[in-house]
Every structure is written in C-alpha cells, then in structure tokens.
Amino acid sequence: MESKLEANLYNAWDKMLDKLTDWLDIFILSIPNIIIALLVFTIAIIFSKYLRKFTLKILKRSNLQASMKNLIAKIVSVVVVLLGLFLILGILNLGKALNTILAGAGVAGLAVGLALQGALANTYSGIILSYVKQLKFGDWIKSNGYEGEVIDINLRAVTVKQKDNNLVYIPNKLVVENPIKNYSTTAQSRVILNCGVGYESNLENVKELVIETIISNFKDVKTDDKIIFLYKEFGDSSINFETRFWINSTSGLEVAKAKSKAIIFIKKAFDKHNINIPFPIRTLEFSNNLTMKNLKLETSENE
C-alpha cells in the first residue's frame, strides 16, 4: 500500500517537473518576443505623449473649446496606446486571449454603461457644450439659478465664478437640458435702478436731475435718449420711479458696480437740491372725544 502511494507521489512529482520544464522552455523561447513587446510598449507610450502634444498644437489654430481640444488629444493618445497593446498581444502569440478580452470588454462595457448613466450623460453633454459657439470661457451666464463668469468647461461640469468669487460647478447635463441666459452675446448691458421721491417734489425737475446726473457720471451714456426714465406708481410714502441706461460691459459684476455708483451719484444730487427720498411713514389719527385725561382713566380702570 505504501509503495503504491509513493509511486503515485513520484509520478505526480515527475509530471510537475516536466510541466515546469516545459514552461521554462517556453519562457526562454519567448524571451526575444517579450523584449520586443516591452520595446513596442515603451515606444507606444512615448509616441502617444508626443502625438498628444502635436495634436494640441494643431488644434490651437481651430475655434474649438479648450476642453474639446484636450479631449481630442487624449483620445488620440489612448488610441495609440491601445494599438500598441494589440500589437504586443500579437507578438506574444496571445491571439486567443485577445478574443477573450474583447468579448469580456463588451459585457463589462454594458454593465459599466448602465452603472454610469449619469456620468456618461455629463460626458456627452460636455462634448456638446464644447461645440456650442454661444458658450465659451469668459462669458457671463445665468443657468439653473446660478449667475457668473464661465471659467472652465470640462467633461463633467461647467464651472461658474459668481459675483462673490465663489465657484459653482453645474453638471453638463443640467446646462444642456435647461435654458442658458448669456449676457456676453451682446456688447452692452442694461442697468435698472428703482427709487422714490416725496410727494412734495417737482417731478419734472426730478426727472431732469436724474438724467443729467447719469450722463455726467457715466462715459458710456452720452445723450439723454440712451436713458429711460419712468414714473411707476404712487407709493405709500413716495412717488416711485425707474431709470434704465446701458453700459459697455457684459459682466454682471460691472452692472452691479454701475448700479452702486448710480445710487451714490443720485443720492448726492438729491441732497444738493433738497429732494427727499422718504422712508415709510404711518400716521395715527385719534377721534376728538379721546383726550389724554380719558386715556389715563381708561388705563387706571384696566389696572
């Protein structure tokens, strides 16, 4: 019994040694192919880097967005590396492994696509935004409730810098699917200012003073026909008006600054000409029968 077991062990050991010897022979015979494969892989990596730089250099002459230029350059680089890997598999006689990898990649790609629907949607939307001429770096836009300057467009999100210098990252899918208000598509922006004057004011003089103040303090406004002045309503404590004028800027920050300056200049002009900007006033009226004596008596009775 023991001799039979020893014979089986020796037989298994011999087979294992034969297998290892065969593998060693195959490895020794494949050393030239392995060296060539390593050289091909190294050349593919180096060539992909140079080709990426060359592609970026060529694309700089085009009108594509910077994010789209980087995307195309990366795709070219990845394609070169993949071609190098396929060539390496051929050199190492791993054709069957290549077919297995491609089949597995198809199944894995389907699973990954289902799991990353949101990310892929943002990537596809980023590619679309890269071709949209109406949206580019430096534009002042309003989208999805956020307003600011576009400082970056990548494959995931549009980066907007707001007036307070905070950054907002809006997913590309939301930008594509929702309306975009681009203030930079025109060369000018409108400043809208609301105010009110007291009921005792001469409305014609107020109108002339406001228009004159804007013209004298804003170089972009040269004539009064560029200013719209409208009285809006009889308010609770003032007659309210609205004035509108244009400035040569598409930045929301510059519009806010112009509005702030206009408030300062108009307030100074009103103070100089004794024009009142009233705050809400409430008047209480008492009947003639109510006197301070009666009020004191009622108060003491309640106590």
Image (tube, rainbow, N blue to C red):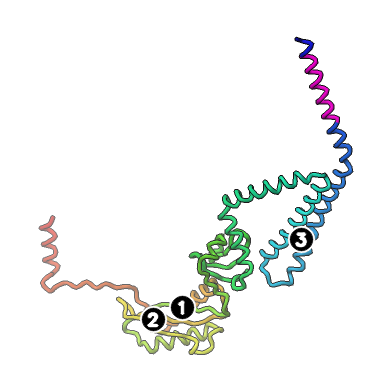
Between 192 and 98, which is closer to the camera in this rendering? 98
Give the amino acid at mark 3. Answer: Arg
According to the picture, the residue beneath numbered tag 1 turns out to be: 192
User: Magenta includes 18?
Assistant: yes
Give the amino acid at mark 1. Answer: Ile
Give the amino acid at mark 2. Answer: Phe
Of the two numbered discs 2 and 1 on the same chain, state the one appearing first in sequence.
1
Of the two numbered discs 3 and 2 on the same chain, state the one appearing first in sequence.
3
Question: Which circle marks residue 71 in the picture?
Answer: none
According to the picture, the residue beneath numbered tag 2 turns out to be: 241
Decide if residue 68 is on the left or right side of residue 219.
right
Measured as percent of width and height from the top left, residue 123 is found at: 61, 59
Q: Quadrant of the N terminus?
A: top right
Measured as percent of width and height from the top left, residue 121 is found at: 57, 58
Measured as percent of width and height from the top left, residue 142 is found at: 52, 69
Q: Which portion, as a residue range, is magenta?
A: 5-21
According to the picture, the residue beneath numbered tag 3 turns out to be: 52
Residue visible at 19% across and 73% down in the picture? 285
Tell me the quarter of the picture where residue 139 sits.
bottom right
